[in-house]
Amino acid sequence: MTSSAKAEKLLQRDTSQAEDSVTVTVQTPAGAFEFSCEHGETLLSAGLRSGVSLPYECATGTCGTCRGRLMKGEVDVGWEASPALAKLKREKGDILLCQAQAKSDCFLRVAAKIVQTFDNAPARFEGTISDILNLTDDVIQFVVNLSAPIAFAAGQFALLRAPTVVGARAYSMVNYEKETDKIVFLVKRKPAGGFCDWLFTEAVDGTKIDVFGPLGRATFDTSEDKDLIIVAGGSGIAGMMSILERATRSGYFKQHLGHVFFGVPTLQDGFYLGELANYVAESNGGLDVTLALSNEAPAQSCHPDYREIQLTSGFVHTAMASAMIGRYQNTLAYLAGPPPMIDGALRILLSDGQLTPQTIRYDKFS
């Protein structure tokens, strides 16, 4: 769909729902931008689907990247317990765009440089959960069947909102297709996690959920002309699988090298190992995969069931540091996992590898 067609579609939708929406004006260093915000929609979602490149990173109230200052109007600030909200100057009108919902016409100030484009703007979809699969005791995979096809880049994520769970959750797409009406997601169960508890304890097959996406800029395209370093902790492998699928399908590893480091506590906690072994086999020597076990020492150097996968002990970022000595030239790094893993990997890549921030793309969980 062309940019003009997308703009026309957006205009038609906004006009038809005008009685249910308010107008939001955002003042930025690049000028002012105006868009409609529907009832129950966050300011971030409304702006992004209107093609306005509002700043964000996690889109779930944790990082604070999407902060703005409300100058006029009234909003519902959303999740009061948001970690990022506690860091803002709320007495001056600071809000989180990913949480706040407009209750009237609003005027905001956002410090980031912003543009407006209708190319690849995220949208709202109705989804239906199916094909639920327990990969380990605490990791679940499921498919969301969408009401309309979606196009996304390898490495992107979507916001999922369940009917009985407060707030949206961000999860990376596991699969990759140029356009598809089925998205595969991966969720690891965490203590007091509302969405994951719902998935693990309720009969959710066939349940309708809201999907907003695609989101995220830590993406891969076959135009990249660099070797790849991929470091993932636990469920961080989700978006990396999409990147590996994209790269493998295009024959990327026949001209470039790929180094994957996947961290789990024990050998029993590994998953997607068959898929990873297949990627190695299809690469003709261009891809290697190491499974790092943080809580046990492997009995041998290769996985007993998947000989293509190497085994090592320790944290995944230290395994990466040991294996990559002298091999950082012309590399692009992708990281996904818990904050300590990301922080450790970043230090190694910047100091030992001498990579620049522009060649490191990461998703830090919280």
Image (tube, rainbow, N blue to C red):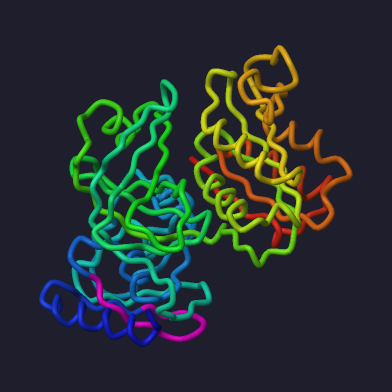
| Residue at the limit of the structure toward the left, as seen here | 19
Q: Which residue is drawn at 41% across and 36% down?
A: 187
26 vs 154: above or below: below
Quadrant hosting residue 307: top right
Nearer to the camera, 166 or 161 = 161
Nearer to the camera, 120 or 75 = 120
94 vs 310: above or below: below
Q: Which residue is drawn at 27% across and 63% down?
A: 148
Q: Where is residue 18 in the image (x, y as percent from the top left)?
A: 15, 79
Q: Which residue is drawn at 86% across and 40% down?
A: 325
Nearer to the camera, 276 or 108 = 276
In the picture, which quadrant includes the N terminus? bottom left
| Residue at the limit of the structure toward the top, as seen here | 299
Q: Residue at x 41, y 64 (%)?
A: 151
Q: Where is residue 2 in the image (x, y as percent from the top left)?
A: 39, 83
Q: Is residue 253 left or right of residue 122?
A: right
Q: Position of residue 86 (x, y in %)?
A: 41, 48
Q: In this view, does 286 lie to the left or right of 203?
A: right
Instruction: Specify the segment rendered in magenta.
Output: 26-37
164 vs 31: above or below: above
Quadrant hosting residue 291: top right
301 vs 203: above or below: above
Whether residue 100 appears in magenta in the rendering, the answer is no
